[in-house]
Image: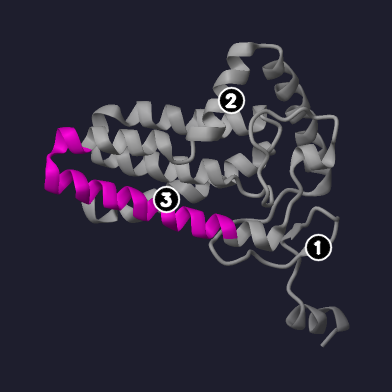
Amino acid sequence: MSSLASLSQVRPMPTGIDRLGFPSYGHLPGGVPNPPSAWAEANELQMVRTLNARALQSPEAVHFTEYMTEHGGIDIWKDFAKQYRQTAGLAKGWAGTAMMWAAMGSATLRTQLAKNGYDRLRPYQVDPSIRTIGKLPKDASYPSGHTSSAYAAATTLASLWPARAQEFMWWAKQVGTSRVHAGVHFPSDVNAGAQVGIRAGLAATSILR
C-alpha cells in the first residue's frame, strides 16, 4: 500500500478552508457547510463595502436597516403569528405558532453551534473602515442568526398560510439583505443562515405534508 493511500485512511481529505487559510476537515454538527475560503471572503468583503456605503447614503435605507436589526429576527414573526392565530382560530393558530417557535429554536441552535465552531470574523472586524448600521452583534459571523430565524419562521408560516407565502419569504429576504447592508455579515453568512432556517421550517411542518 502506498504512503499516500495509507495517509488517506487516517486523515480525510479537506472539505474547506477556514478563515485563517488552514484546511477544514468535515462539517460541524447541525449540517452547516464550511465558510468560504479566504480568497472568496476577500471578494465578499468588497461587496459588503459597496452595499454598506450605498445604504449609508440614504436615510430611508439606514432607518430600514436599523429596524431590521431590532425587529427582523423575532418581532416581525411574532406579529405574523398573531395574525395567523386571528385567522386560523385558537387551537389551530396556537399549534401553528408552536411550530414556528420550534423551527426558530432549531435554527438558532444549529446556527450557534456553527458560530462557535467556525468563529468567523465579521466584515467590520476584518475592515474597520466599514461603518456599521444598528446594534453591533457580539458573536461570530457565520452563519447569520437573524437570517436563519427569519427563514425558519417564514418557511413555517408559508406552509401554514400559503396565501401569504410570498410575503413571508420577501420579509425573510429583507432581513438577510439588511445584515449585509449593515456591514455585520458577509453574503455567505446570509446564504448559510437561509439554508439552516429553511431546513428547520420544513422539518417543523413535515407533519402537514
Q: For residue 99, which numbered disc appears in the image?
A: none
- Across and down, in percent, residue 136 comes to 68, 39
Between tags 3 and 2, which lies in front? Answer: 2
User: Is residue 202 highlighted in magenta?
Assistant: no
State the residue position of label 2.
Answer: 65
Residue 26 picture location, percent across and down: 67, 66
Q: Residue at point 76% right, 38% down?
A: 123
Q: Which mark is residue 104?
A: 3
Task: Report how far apart the C-alphas of labels 3 and 1 lie in the structure.
Answer: 31 Å
Q: In the rendered image, which quarter is residue 113 located in?
A: bottom right
Horizontal placement of 109 versus 202: left or right? Answer: right
In the rendered image, residue 88 lying in the magenta stretch gets the answer yes
The overriding secondary structure of the stretch rendered in magenta is helix
Residue nearest the observer in this picture, 158 or 125: 125
**SS of the residue under disc 2:** helix
Q: Earlier in the sequence, mark 3 or mark 2?
A: 2
Kindly identify the residue that appears in the image at 87 percent across and 83 percent down.
3
Q: CA distance from mark 2 to mark 1?
A: 35 Å
Question: Where in the figure is residue 5, as x and y percent of width and height?
Answer: 80, 80
Q: Which numbered dot is residue 23?
A: 1
